[in-house]
Amino acid sequence: MRALDVLSGAIRNSFRSRLRTSLTVIAIFIGAFTLTITNGLGTGINNYIDTQLSSIGAADVMTVTKPQEQTEQADGPTEYDPDAGSAISADGPPGTTVLAMNEGDLESLRAIDGVVSAEAVVSVRPDYIQNGSGDRFEISVGEAGESPDLVAGAFEPGASETQLVLPTDFVEPLGFSSNEDAVGSTVTIAVSDGEGTQHELDATVAGVQEPTLFGSTALMNDALTSSLFDLQQTGVTGDTGFASATVRFDDSLDAAGIDDLKATLVDEGYAGVTTADQLGAFKAVIDGIILVLNAFAIIALIAAGFGIINTLLMSVQERTREIGLMKAMGMSGGRIFGLFSLEAVFIGLLGSAIGAVIAMGAGTVISSVLSNGLLEGLAGLQIIAFTPLSIATVLLLVMGIAFVAAVLPASRAARQSPIDSLRYE
Amino acid sequence: MTSTVLSITDLTKVYGSGPSRFDALKGVSLDIAEGESVAIVGKSGSGKSTLMHIMALLDSPTSGSLVVDGHPAASLRGAKLNELRNRTFGFVFQQFFLTPTATVLENVMLPLVIAGVRPAERKRRAMDTLVRLGLGDKALNRATDLSGGQKQRVVIARALVNNPRIIFADEPTGNLDSATGATVEDKLFALNREQGITLVIVTHDEDLAARCDRRIYLKDGEIVDSLVASPATAEAVAA
């Protein structure tokens, strides 16, 4: 028997008992639909995080701190160590401190293999932002990453001109008519120095960005950051030390190379965290949730697998005579097995294809409804997204489950003896 | 002199063991020549169906030897066995065993599909065979829509379509009234006469058996009698 005949025979057979096949297909459909939606949810959220990642941090940058060495919890007060350096409070749970870093630390960081540059992370706290003589607004600023997700304009972190990217929610209050209108105009930013004197600095709006996961932050280029910092440090004497340094590493490093670099940093007494690491925690939580949801979908699919076993067993029972006849006519057990297992795989394909198509339709509708409603604040988030790979994975997985389910009934059919099947009652 | 297509020697078949042991065949020897028509006659339980199943390679004997078309059956396995079944045998059953949901043409094509014949060719051959049996206009009907006699002619077409050497017929007229039965018998014997296809008919119908060249009587798993029809009788029946 030709392979094509086995295939078409299997497809034809699955339509013989339409009601039974439809019910099994519905069971598979439910599982496949759920799995596609939950997968889409994972893809959508992780896509969003990736976009955020590229807008807030470059891939070849890590933040390096000097963690305080764990002191043994001893009875009584800890003895003073003059070499330990001074502690600075840092991000993290209340009470988290790191050791202050100085120029010497930067030098030793630059000496590490793979490190391209090491700069102190300076924190600039502008007082306000103003357009011409309009209202003044408080603004928080951050350093730009590699590729901010801009809705208007273009941004070069390395430009010599002082530039910044405005969040969209500042456009209207600052008196611009549109995002495009804001691009290219000059705004004034003010900072106060250590003695309380206020300094003003002009900067060009290079682009406009949707608010990110981290709130609405204006992004500044290196030139603007250093100019503002210099103004802020006016009158401050001496080396104040800083909490962290930005290390730019060789961008040819792969994940293993980055891990090696981190290990080297730990050996030297530092701790390095890339932006991907910071968001990695987010991703891990989301992946965990998606995994649990997927597990439910797979339970539904396994239940549907038993439906397939049932359907096929009945179908083998019904077609006992036919199987006997085909064997008497020289059909091999292997072909009979193929006929029944392909029938199951076809039922699986039918259920999962319908499930995937409807899930894609439903997912697209749901995510567009949500992004205009409940999730409007998270611009650029398409909560459910589909990739051809994840759809193909769902289809193959369901077909695999169907095949496994078919093994018992199909091998029973393949082993059937022709005379037992043809014996008259 | 004609060659032997089926040769069995001292064949036994035992079902079960101990107190439930049942000897279905107790040493049967038989040679069937090419183009011969043989009736195996016996009551139910005489072992005639078991004998037919073993001859058609559907069952294996407990002891004894079977040679089909020069191939010792004991040495046949897997693909070779399946190919021999497909190429050599055609089956006509009392209960038809037609696939009810498929068309007449599809039912007739089944042995060709199993043999792996190309779609266009198998359609043509199945159609030719149906036309020869006077069922050309029924080709696209569902098998269930036919009368008993038509169904049995479809079964004969299916047995015939792959040009077998031997057709095994198990009570071919058992489910038909005598008039239709006679037509079906005529078809079978015509094939035997005109195309030289060997015919092995298992029956308890004496009239049908009498039309065969040879009658083998089975009782309790043994051949009790063997009659060769005189040419005069055979001609008289044929006429």
Image (cartoon, grey):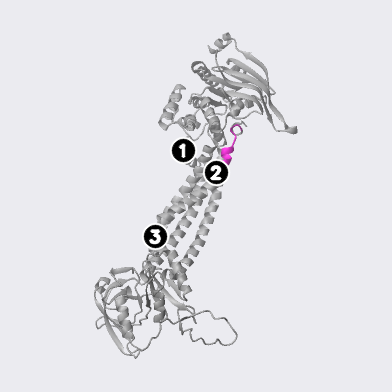
Residue placed under numbered mark 1 in the picture: A3
* Quadrant in the picture for residue B96: top right
Q: The N terminus of chain B is located in which quarter?
A: top right
User: With A32 as the anchor, is A180 left or right in this view?
Assistant: left
User: How much space separates mark 2 and mark 3, taking CA atoms?
Assistant: 36 Å
Labels 1 and 2: the sequence-earlier one: 1
User: How much space separates mark 1 and mark 2, taking CA atoms?
Assistant: 20 Å
Residue placed under numbered mark 2 in the picture: A312
Q: Can you give x and y, in whole percent of width and height, for residue A14 in the image? A: 49, 42
Q: Main secondary structure of the magenta part?
A: helix
The chain ID associated with circle 1 is A
Residue B173 shows in this picture: no
Give me the residue at 28% from left, 85% from top. A200
Residue placed under numbered mark 3 in the picture: A365
Q: Residues within 10 Å of mark 1 (few under 14, many from 20)?
A: few
Labels 1 and 3: the sequence-earlier one: 1
Q: Can you give x and y, in whole percent of width and height, for residue A358 in the image? A: 42, 54
Q: Is residue B209 above or below residue A74?
A: above
Q: Residues within 10 Å of mark 2 (few under 14, many from 20)?
A: many
Q: Which residues are magenta?
A: A409-419
